[in-house]
Amino acid sequence: MPRPGKATRADAGTRERLLAAAAAEFAARGFAGANIDRIADAARLNKAMIYYHFTNKAALYREILRDMFGAVQARVREAAASGAPPAAKIRLFVTAIAVEAEARPHFPPIWFREIAEGGAHLDLETLRHVADILKALGQIIEEGVRARQFKRVNPVIVHAGIVGPLLLYFATQPLRQRLKKAGVPAAVALGRDDVIAHIQNVALGTLEGRLL
Amino acid sequence: MPRPGKATRADAGTRERLLAAAAAEFAARGFAGANIDRIADAARLNKAMIYYHFTNKAALYREILRDMFGAVQARVREAAASGAPPAAKIRLFVTAIAVEAEARPHFPPIWFREIAEGGAHLDLETLRHVADILKALGQIIEEGVRARQFKRVNPVIVHAGIVGPLLLYFATQPLRQRLKKAGVPAAVALGRDDVIAHIQNVALGTLEGRLL
DNA sequence: GTCTATAAATAGATAGAC
DNA sequence: GTCTATCTATTTATAGAC
């Protein structure tokens, strides 16, 4: 197992270039479809460098998953721990996911793929991050219930109502372009801010019992 | 290119067995990850039979995609064309997707994967089906607007609010089991009917302007 | 219609030079 | 740290017997 220390000489963030190229490749083709040679090429490096920096293809992929879910988890916990009132925390929760997803174009596709695979590639640490995201939402809801501002709603439903549309919006951007060319124009004129605001309103409408 | 006619003798729905096995395999591992041998084994047949019935792996996959999206499209158009009032049509729209997704366990994972891939495997016919689903929703909304029952909302947002949570709910069933074992119990107690009703209410709450 | 055997290509991984 | 060359396993696809 190679143990590369700090870069010694010419290394212009080689490891980071590999991670970025790999993330794009995994997002576009999935774990099985991703090709080590293509990743190396995209990073303007050689295939051997991947095995110098990472144990194997699976380890490289896990690294990307950890970064993704770790970032969301951190931001989401921050929202839950902030001093804001429950409704504001819900808005922060939505924003947290949106911001991290936007910071990583590979995020929504990879998240979808992991769901499709039943989380087959998630190691224990990453699984904990995923669980923590749900737990943080649960805490926010519980707090709102105690403050008599929220109805008690199953966090999984609220979570699905937030994460589902949000990821779908980001991940379908390319597909909507294709649909537009096939003659469905409405599919494109959709502002990011409107989407986020709408999803926040839906979540709060649900929790504050304004749905019926 | 093999042109198998009707089954002549012992064929106990061979083609259908292959399709079923393939759907499960594609759902679990994606297009690239799916293995022709495994599909044949699962159908208790030989790999060569796949190439007897289908041109190649891609054609087999396309067949499954066509069936999926064709079924949803048909049911959704039916809902849009029914005599029901707009609000009931929205409920039918949600049910249509839920019913077809439940009839095919492979449906939600494969849909997610296609989104992640930007619809790379969708041929023109299937792409039209996808577009028709969105169009049908757009028509229902338009009808509701004309009847002064709905606010005019971008169909893509409404669609995301329906399809996102619905697919997420169905597709995360396995992952939620894993989460439960990792100590997040709330993740499982969630009834199918409650989820569907909730998503219907969210869509109608959005369209009828009850969100704020 | 169904199978065995095999061709042909792809792709993950490693050894070793520089 | 980086590259070339190569080994090896996997896997799509086909030829041809029954």
Image (cartoon, coloured by chain):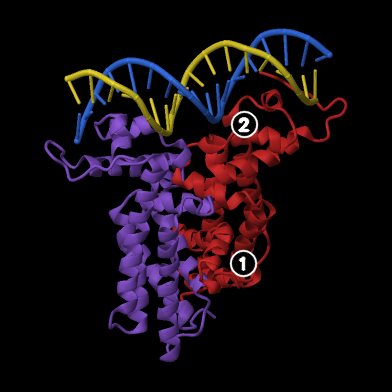
Chain colours: A red, B purple, C blue, D yellow
Q: Marks 2 and 1: CB-CB under 8 Å?
A: no
What's the distance in space between the residues labelled 2 and 1, CA to CA? 39 Å
Query: Which image quadrant: the N terminus of chain B?
Result: top left
Horizontal and vertical percent position of residue B63: 35, 50
- Which residue type does callout 1 highlight? Arg
Q: Quadrant of residue B86?
A: bottom left
Residue beneath label 1, please?
A91
Residue A2, compared with residue A194, is above or below; it is above
- Which residue occupies 63% across, 24% down? A55
Horizontal and vertical percent position of residue B26: 40, 42
Label 2: element kind: helix
Q: Quadrant of residue C18?
A: top right
Any part of residue B172 in sight: no
Discs 2/1, front: 2
Residue density around tag 1, few if under 14, some if 14–19, many if 20 or more, within 10 Å: some
Residue A81, compared with residue A7, is above or below; it is below
Any part of residue B47 in sight: yes
Residue beneath label 2, please?
A36
Task: Please give the chain letter of the residue carrying mark 2.
Answer: A
Is residue B11 found left or right of A154 in the rendered image? left
Residue closest to the far left: B9
Horizontal and vertical percent position of residue A161: 48, 63
